[in-house]
Image (cartoon, rainbow, N blue to C red):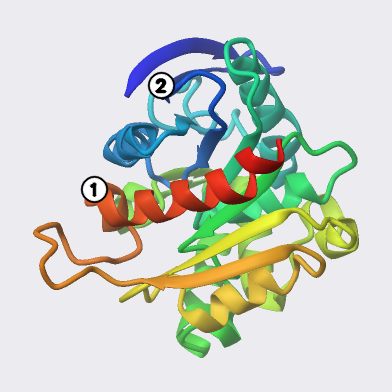
Amino acid sequence: MDTYAEITLPDGATTTLHVAQSVPDAPVVLVLPAMGVPAGYYAPFLDELAREGVHAAVADYPGQGDSLPRIGRDHDYGYEHLAEHWLPTVVAGLRAAHEGPVVLLGHSLGGHIAAVHLSGDDPCAAAAVLIGSGTPFWRSHSGAKTLAQTQAMGLLTRVMGYWPGPRFGFGGVQPRTLIREWSAFARHGRLTPSGRDVVPGLRGRDLPLLVVDLDNDPLAPPAAVDGLVAMFTDADMERFTFTKRADDPGKPVDHYSFARSPQLIAARIATWVHERVAASA
């Protein structure tokens, strides 16, 4: 994975766009990271996608990884900022060198950001992939335990002014508005950034959508994935469950480790991109 460009965001924050280059005119898969996961974590996954014939890119969200300034009481944003400001700016940086179609690959929280962006007026992607991405709605997880945990996160974030994830071993440092919207999503099952329900905006979006369930993934169990996928009412969807093959020497498949042992899953995703996106470009 090569460093491609420094990106300046509309609010003056900066991030680094990393790209694993492939063949000329190939489509570009842009990874939207999970909550608290730095861009560099996806390097093996991007490199494998590039070997399979697609450009692959990733950038940190504002204040995450190498992006500056750091999250705190004075650096706040929510879903809408990521979907309508950060994402288009990153895609514009990609377009400076790659003219092929862009595929959004949302991992976990990244799938929510993809949904918000694609529900808007002028989406900048030809297709989407959801991997380990589902609704955090408590009824789709472990019931009252999930409800209590997510609402406690929301409450503590209001008190602190941001989410101090490293103290609790989950999610990294996160901005208060994003956690407030995420915890509301967990409470009532609707993704409504800034009060806007994304479902009406996704109606009529008949874009290709690949949904990947991960074996052994308690953070995105099938019922939770079902809840997020249901929002893409008119997408042309394909779905499969990725399970590590018995003779694969890599780590067991879970919510995170797929990106560190990516050979089989990258090949499957790249094949879908070639068949459903590159062929129709």
Crowding around mark 1 (Cα neighbors within 10 Å: few <14, some 14 to 19, many 20+) is some
Disc 2 crowd, CA 10 A, few/some/many (<14, 14-19, 20+): many
* The label number, if any, that marks residue 28 in the structure image: none
**Would residue 157 be seen by someone viewing this image from the given angle?**
no
Residue type pointed to by label 1: Arg
**Residue occupying the point 41% across, 46% down:** 36
Tell me residue 262's x, y (percent). Answer: 28, 50
The residue at the point 31 percent across, 76 percent down is 216
Q: Give the alpha-carbon distance from disc 2 to disc 1, as whole Å.
A: 18 Å
Give whichever of 50, 215 is nearer the camera: 50
Percent x, y of residue 219: 42, 70
In this view, the residue in front, 195 or 219, is: 219
Residue 77 in the figure: left or right of residue 212: right
Is 243 rendered above or below residue 124?
below
Q: Secondary structure at mark 2?
A: loop
239 on left or right of 220: right
Quadrant position of residue 203: bottom right
- Image position, residue 99 (x, y; %): 65, 19
Q: Residue at x 26, y 50 (%)?
A: 263
Q: Nearer the viewer, residue 159 or 152?
A: 152
Q: Which type of secondary structure does the marked residue at label 1 adopt? A: helix
Place of residue 61 in the rendered image (x, y in percent of width and height, measured from the top left): 53, 33
Q: Which mark is residue 21?
A: 2
Check if mark 2's residue and mark 1's residue have beta carbons within 8 Å: no
Q: Which quadrant of the rendered structure holds the N terminus?
A: top left
Q: Give the number of callouts.
A: 2
The residue that appears at 64% across and 41% down in the rendered structure is 279
Residue 25 sits above or below residue 96 on the image:
below
Residue 87 appears in the picture as rendered: yes
For label 1, the residue is: 260
Earlier in the chain: of badge 2 and badge 1, it is 2
- Closer to the camera in the image, 230 or 246: 246
